[in-house]
Amino acid sequence: MSSPPSDLTVLRLVWLGLALLGVALTIWGDQVQVRPSEWVALACLGLWCLIETSIRRNWAALLTIPAMVLGIGCALPLYLFFRSRRIA
């Protein structure tokens, strides 16, 4: 009997690695004033935005990238707003 193929693609491993990095930086981040976990979340959102925008051709979603200056609390809901738009 053969084992089922792994569903851990390179991209899924990147998401997992960023999640683990976010956990590690959150634990360590109590000792510094900058919130490293927010930087990881912004990097993850930026990568997701770039990859999915190139696939779905939803170019307006790229407006999320400059919104990241305002933080994850602004950028993530904005991206989800653009992403929820019906595509042709």
Image (tube, grey):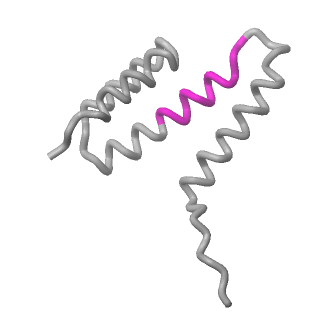
Q: Position of residue 36 (x, y in %)?
A: 69, 22
Q: Which residue is at a point 43% across and 21% down the rendered structure image? A: 75
Residue sitting at the far front: 1
- Drawn side of residue 87 relative to residue 67, left or right: left
Q: Nearer the viewer, residue 26 or 66?
A: 26
- Drawn side of residue 58 relative to residue 48, left or right: left
Q: Where 68 sits versus 33, above or below?
A: below
Is residue 38 highlighted in magenta? yes
Q: Position of residue 41 (x, y in %)?
A: 58, 29
- Magenta stretch prevailing secondary structure: helix
Q: Position of residue 59 (x, y in %)?
A: 25, 36
Q: Quadrant of residue 62?
A: top left
Q: Quadrant of residue 67?
A: top left
- Drawn side of residue 87 relative to residue 51, left or right: left
Report the number of numbered marks. 0
Residue sitting at the far top: 33
Q: Which residue is at a point 36% across and 22% down the rendered structure image? A: 78
The magenta stretch is 34-46
Q: Nearer the viewer, residue 73 or 32?
A: 73
Is residue 55 highlighted in magenta? no
Q: Which residue is at a point 83% across and 24% down the rendered structure image? A: 28
Q: Quadrant of residue 58?
A: top left
Residue sitting at the far left: 88
Q: Which residue is at a point 57% across and 53% down the rendered structure image? A: 12
Q: Where 5 sits versus 10, above or below?
A: below
In the picture, the quarter occupied by the N terminus is bottom right
Q: Position of residue 40 (x, y in %)?
A: 62, 30
